[in-house]
Amino acid sequence: LSGRYFEVLKDRLYCDAPTSPRRRSCRTVCHRLVQGLCTLLAPVLSFTADEAWASIPGSEGHVFEQRFPEGQMAFDVKPWQRLWEIRETVQAALEPYRASKVIGTGLDARINLTLTAEDRSSLEGLGEALADLLVVSEVTLQEGPALAVAVEPHPGIKCPRCWNHLGGVGQGADADLCARCWDVVRAERA
């Protein structure tokens, strides 16, 4: 969870507006995950699971009174498995740039991703922005015979709130904010 889902999720949790559907859906998933994990761990780590259960907002009764969660695969996992494979390739391509201090994080990079037609169709069907899933500032796509990744430092202005290099849209003291962060900050001040 932490190496994949939570890394993608934290940008939405920290930077999206508190009432945004993306952020609220992430919070719902996290709530269900912690409830399910506590329930599954209760027979093995009884005291820890019971203490954790007591601190979960909205949880009633004791963890030992809960039913085990039932997993239901309501979607095709193959596109997600392929995404994680592609993400590992992107991370490997970013590593030499990190090691040589050309970039600090993936958000400092712009990548050009060459995908097969099948991979491109599969990833577009996920319904999420590829840059968000790969945790980079920008992704350009092109079709080719095989997967290839080209990395370059992103030339854009780094948003001080979300660290994406899509800043420069705000106004006044917040001039370096990206469009999303500018909208959130402006709404919070209103």
Image (spheres, rainbow, N blue to C red):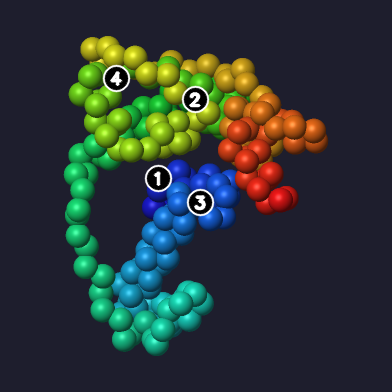
Q: Nearer the viewer, mark 4 or mark 3?
A: 3
Please tell me which residue is depicted at 30% across the width and 38% down the height of the picture: 126
Circle 2 — which element? strand
Query: How far apart in space, not on screen, are marks 4 and 2 (Cα)?
Result: 16 Å
Query: How far apart in space, not on screen, are marks 4 and 1 (Cα)?
Result: 21 Å
- Tell me residue 71's x, y (percent): 22, 62
Circle 1 — which element? loop
Amino acid residing under circle 4: Leu
Circle 3 — which element? loop
Q: Is residue 100 visible to us here?
A: no
Q: Determine whether 46 is above or below 175 in the image.
A: below
- Tell me residue 134's x, y (percent): 43, 33
Circle 4 crowding by C-alpha within 10 Å: few under 14, some 14–19, many from 20: many
Residue holding disc 4 = 115
Amino acid residing under circle 1: Arg
Q: Earlier in the sequence, mark 2 or mark 1?
A: 1
Circle 1 crowding by C-alpha within 10 Å: few under 14, some 14–19, many from 20: few
Query: How far apart in space, not on screen, are marks 4 and 3 (Cα)?
Result: 31 Å
Q: Earlier in the sequence, mark 2 or mark 3?
A: 3
The answer to the question of whether label 2 and label 3 lie on touching residues, with beta carbons closer than 8 A, is no
Q: Determine whether 118 is above or below 54 in the image.
A: above
Q: Nearer the viewer, mark 3 or mark 1?
A: 3
Residue holding disc 2 = 138
Which residue sits furthest front?
190
Q: Earlier in the sequence, mark 4 or mark 3?
A: 3
Please tell me which residue is depicted at 29% across the width and 19% down the height of the picture: 115
Amino acid residing under circle 3: Ser
Q: Earlier in the sequence, mark 4 or mark 1?
A: 1
Query: How far apart in space, not on screen, are marks 2 and 3 (Cα)?
Result: 22 Å
Snapshot quadrant of residue 4: top left
Residue holding disc 3 = 20
